[in-house]
Amino acid sequence: EVQLVESGGGLVQPGTSLRLSCAASGFTFDDYTMHWVRQAPGKGLEWVSGINWNSGRIDYADSVKGRFTISRDNSKYSLYLEMNTLRVEDTALYYCARDEGAYCSGGGCYGAFDIWGQGTMVTVSS
Amino acid sequence: DIVMTQSPATLSVSPGERATLSCRASQSVSSNVAWYQQKPGQAPRLLIYGAFTRATGIPGRFSGSGSETEFTLTISSLQSEDFAVYYCQQYNNWPRTFGQGTKVDNK
């Protein structure tokens, strides 16, 4: 079964750090670009960051640039999000998602997000 | 960044009726648009990619159309399980961006 399972969320104070993990199974992990998407309580979806198969292409939303770092370990079938200097507005359910990669451009293949995990909740509060 | 604007914010539809959801991109995104369905307490589910291709297992009552800047998701005959929030997303440019969502509720 194709599956993504996030972990690492929790309640933290503003200014602190947290590391999220996403464990993949049921597919060849290093064939795919991966993403983090978040959803604040009662709000819509916000793309956070994406990383291509070999970590050669990485992008961030402006709202997290300079504070968050995405990475992956293909040998462990795992995706990570290192979150530093957390703010109250970072409070959200964080999903990892697989990129189905049907559209090829600029040396990479990208697409819609076809597999999602169930999310891990991050709450930033004093 | 490309802004995706969905309309309406809420669509009230009776079961069996047709639902038409719109999404407009602030600049051309070719056909690199996806639609997702999200029910309360669940992760989003991919419905449509490439503007009009149904994802695996998605019923035929869901269809997508459009290109460049104007896109539409149509549910031909709404079923009770279709009441949910629907999001469009562009993947033509970085950063990826989502619309703010359209909630389809029971009239």
Image (tube, coloured by chain):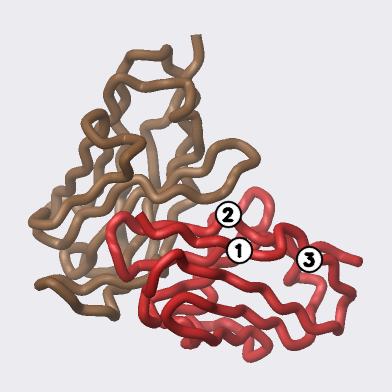
| Mark nearer the N terminus (3 vs 2) | 3
Q: Residue at x 27, y 38 (%)?
A: A81
Which one of the lettered chains is coloured brown?
A
Q: Can you identify the residue that label 3 sits on?
A: B11
Q: Vertical placement of A113 versus A11: above or below?
A: below
In this view, the mark in front (3 or 1): 1
Q: Hey, which quadrant is residue B96 in on the image? A: bottom left
Q: Are marks 3 and 2 on the same chain?
A: yes
Q: How much space separates mark 3 and mark 2, taking CA atoms?
A: 14 Å
Callout 3: SS: strand
From the image, tell me which residue sits under label 2. Answer: B100
Please give the chain letter of the residue carrying mark 1. Answer: B
User: With respect to residue A58, does B55 lie above or below?
Assistant: below
Which image quarter is the N terminus of chain B in? bottom left
Give the chain coloured red.
B
Q: Residues within 10 Å of mark 2 (few under 14, many from 20)?
A: many
The residue sitting at 35% across, 45% down in the picture is A48
Disc 1 target residue = B6
- Looking at the rendered structure, the kind of residue marked 2 is Gln
- Foreground residue among B20 and B86: B20
Residue at 50% in and 39% down: A93
Q: Is residue B71 above or below residue B42?
A: below
Is residue A74 placed above or below A102 in the rendered structure? above
- Mark 1 and mark 2 lie on one chain; the one further toward the N terminus is 1
Q: Position of residue A6 (x, y in %)?
A: 39, 44
